[in-house]
Image (cartoon, grey):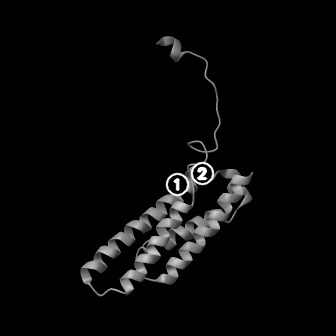
């Protein structure tokens, strides 16, 4: 037991928490596509119960968008990425705001959903650029 405590340590370095390949901005995009689809379904349905359920689900999807973007921002992207892509902090901030209460979570606006999808696409473009190098 004491041998393990006093054994020499080996220093390791990793780019992310797990072997790369577990992160993907597509997760945020799928949830944002769901938001856009829900907005269309709500617009076509006058049933108050349906609309209430749809809005609750839309709000849950918006939280998932924020979660997936934050995971990329905090666990995948590292200082060299932020140095090479200085707009990345702003993009993630704008995307999470578009997913949040003042954006898709709190509104039934297809244009906001489209803006959110566009921001996610910008983040994804940077993400895939980082995977090349």
Q: Of 69 and 48, which appears nearest the observer?
A: 48
Element class at badge 2:
helix
Which residue corresponds to the image point at 67% horizontal and 66% vertical from the top-left?
Answer: 87
Mark 1 touches mark 2? (CB < 8 Å): yes
Q: Quadrant of residue 102?
A: bottom left
Q: Nearer the viewer, residue 34 or 130?
A: 34
- Give the total number of marks visible in the rendering: 2
Any part of residue 107 in sight? no
- x then y, percent, for residue 83: 72, 56
Q: Is residue 3 above or below residue 29?
A: above
Left or right side of 13 for 96: left
Q: Secondary structure at mark 1?
A: helix
Of mark 1 and mark 2, the one earlier in the sequence is 1
Residue 41 as seen in the image, left or right of residue 66: left
For residue 46, which numbered disc appears in the image? none
Residue 94: % across, % down? 56, 70
Q: Which residue is mark 2?
A: 76
**CA distance separating discs 1 and 2:** 7 Å
Q: Residue at x 38, y 81 (%)?
A: 41
Q: Residues within 10 Å of mark 2 (few under 14, many from 20)?
A: some
User: Which residue is identified by label 1?
Assistant: 71
Residue at figure coordinates x 44%, y 73% from the top left: 35
Q: Circle 1: is it few (<14), some (14-19), or many (20+) Cα within 10 Å?
A: some
Residue 39: percent from left, percent from top: 42, 80
Residue 18 seen: yes
Q: Is residue 76 left or right of residue 50?
A: right
Q: Residue at x 57, y 60 (%)?
A: 25
- In this view, 8 is above or below 97: above
Residue 11 figure quarter? top right
């Amino acid at each position: 037991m004491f041998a393990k405590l006093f054994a020499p340590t080996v220093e390791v370095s990793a780019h992310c928490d797990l072997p790369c390949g577990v992160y993907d901005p597509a997760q945020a995009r799928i949830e944002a596509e769901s938001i856009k689809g829900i907005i269309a379904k709500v617009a076509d349905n006058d049933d108050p119960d349906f609309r209430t359920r749809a809005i609750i689900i839309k709000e849950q999807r918006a939280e998932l968008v924020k979660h997936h973007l934050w995971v990329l921002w905090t666990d995948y992207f590292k200082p060299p990425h932020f140095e090479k892509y200085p707009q990345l902090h702003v993009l993630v901030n704008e995307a999470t705001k578009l997913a949040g209460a003042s954006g898709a979570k709190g509104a039934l606006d297809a244009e906001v959903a489209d803006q959110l999808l566009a921001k996610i696409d910008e983040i994804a473009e940077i993400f895939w650029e980082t995977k090349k190098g």
